[in-house]
Amino acid sequence: MKMNFWLAGIIAIATLSLTSFISCSSEAGPQGGTPSAIKASIDNIEVFASYNGNEKGFRGKVSGSSITIDLPANIDSWTDSWIRIYLDYGKSIQLNGTGTTYSGSSSEKITGVTLSSLNSILVKGSGYEDQSYTVKINKKLYVSYNKNYTGAVTNWTSVVPSSTVLYSAGDKISLPAEEAQRSKYRQLGWSSSTDAESPEYDVSGEIAVTESMVNAGVLDLYVTWSKYCIGQLLENVTDVDGKTQTGYVAYICGKNDSVKAKSSKPSESWTYLIVSKYGENRLTDVTWSNATFTGAYLPTKTEMKLIIENLWENSTSRQWKIFSDGSSTSSNWDYYWTATVDDADSSKAYYASVTTNYNGSYAGNVVSTKSKGDSLKAIGVSHIE
């Protein structure tokens, strides 16, 4: 009797343990064989496409059973578009619920998709419940910055924003604060056309985004380069005073340059400072008071520094271009008046010392002041729009 009772107790305990094991197994998730326990899911989604040969990436946002992706409104006209969807191992997807089944591995490029019509993604996985995601595409504006020049722009990678930024109507586009650097030319601003001589937008300016811009999908901006370059000879051009001039471009002025306020023509809207060609508007052995020109100005101290620095090329060309009568290649120091008066002594004015070094190295500067009664040389400058 006691033996039967003991045996019955062991059987009861064993039965309880087996029941508990079976119960735990039924709640173990996909590996336990109950497909409704966990839904198949998407970890991340990215869209890639190329515009003007530059591939850009756009990351979607997954929230619950919805996916939101900001894309340029004209994304379907971009080239080489593809999608990458991140899933766990063993899952697969179908776009818009039908058609080709993709593995969804991070290495798989899903191509041939019309992005603007992507509205849903169905995820499947063995041992998982199917999960359907609703996809919403938000139309945005992308800005494409273009060098507008086939040669080298030495700082282009630092000028152009490194990250992909999309804009909505009402946003402000902050244009690059750094000027693009091209030998002997200067960036005056940005324009929406390649051949603009005057910029539509300033360097470091702002553009207000409109709904029509967003609907266009892309705003193409091109660097507006200066029309003329440093050292270029301009013949018979009209200056800001309406007078005809011939001379070499010595400086290209930006909108906010401080030199504008320190110029010999500060009140006018000029862009190019030119220096009269030798033999024209050039004086020899004149006092400061007599160093006046017909239709030209004496350069200020600031302008004279720019002339020397920007027009120096070598010991021969520098003499022939500016500080010469067309035949002199003297290696002696020559002195030229500026229009800037010594602040501490109104009887004196600043002057420049220039020479042709034997090796063509830089040899010119505005060093000090001389009495206005001294006899020096002088060159004339003009200002061109």
Image (cartoon, helix red, strand yellow):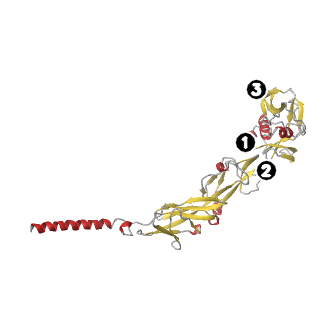
Q: Which secondary structure, mark 3?
A: loop
Q: Is residue 369 above or below residue 261?
A: above
Residue located 67% across and 58% down the image: 219
Specify whether residue 270 is in view. no
- At 15% across and 67% down in the image, what residue appears? 7
Task: Write down the residue under mark 2.
Answer: 227
Mark whose residue sits in front, 3 or 1: 1
Mark 3 highlights which residue?
344
- Furthest toward the left, the residue is 1
**Coordinates of residue 272 in the picture (x, y in percent):** 79, 45
Q: Residues within 10 Å of mark 3 (few under 14, many from 20)?
A: few
Instruction: Tell me if residue 239 comes above or below residue 138 in the rendering.
Output: above
Dot placed on the residue nearer the N-terminal end, 2 or 3: 2
Circle nearer the viewer, 2 or 3: 2
Residue 257: image tag: 1
Amino acid carrying label 2: it is Lys
Q: In the rendered image of this protein, does residue 263 appear above or below residue 221?
A: above
Q: Left or right: 254 with respect to 238? A: left
Horizontal side of residue 124 vs 367, given as left or right: left
Q: Nearer the viewer, mark 1 or mark 2?
A: 2
First along the sequence among labels 1 and 2: 2
Q: Secondary structure at mark 1?
A: loop
Query: Which residue is the extreme one toward the bottom?
Result: 99
Residue type, label 3: Ala
